[in-house]
Amino acid sequence: MSLEVSDKVPFLDLRAAYLELKGELDEAYRRVMQSGWYIVGEEVDAFEREWAVFCGARHCVGVGKGLDALHLALRAMGVGPGDEVIVPSNTYIATWLSPTPAPPLSRWSRTSGLTTWTLPESSLP
């Protein structure tokens, strides 16, 4: 059986998502471009306030990338030198790099086919 072009499911349709929010996204883009503030500034302040409210938190800090977010989360949890951080083997490099500014011991979790090997619950604090 051969697939016809019409039988294929698109992987990701970013255009549809954009068109759904076009007015709001275009207006936000214009505000940022007209202000000249691409980092920090009023738009980031507004995002941080609104996200904190959405999450029920007192504060929110916007960061530049996921690596920064992971690193700050580990620091907030008190993870530091000598601590062990277990990361999945099938992950993005930022997951591995996030502990490195305060390097704990990182260990691969092993994944084989559909079986994931994990630490026994008794070994966890």
Image: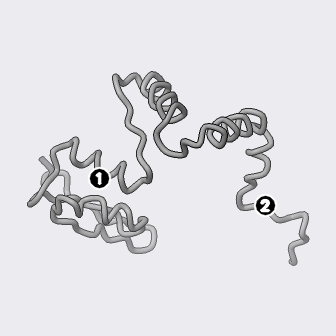
User: Mark 1 falls on what kind of element?
Assistant: helix
User: Mark 2 falls on what kind of element?
Assistant: loop
Q: Residue at x 70, y 39 (%)?
A: 30
Res 83 quadrant in image: bottom left
How far separated are the C-alphas under marks 2 and 1?
Answer: 37 Å
Vertical comparison of 112 with 53: above or below = below
- Amino acid at the residue labelled 2: Val
Observer-nearest of 108 and 29: 29
Q: Which residue is labeled 2 in the image? A: 9
Q: Mark 2 and mark 1 in contact? Answer it, CB < 8 Å.
A: no
Q: In the displayed structure, does residue 8 sit left or right of residue 52?
A: right
Res 101 quadrant in image: bottom left
Q: Residue at x 87, y 77 (%)?
A: 2
Observer-nearest of 83 and 123: 83
Q: Which residue is labeled 1 in the image? A: 71
The single residue placed furthest to the bottom in the displayed view is 2
Q: In the displayed structure, does residue 23 sit left or right of residue 90?
A: right
Res 97 quadrant in image: bottom left
- Amino acid at the residue labelled 1: His
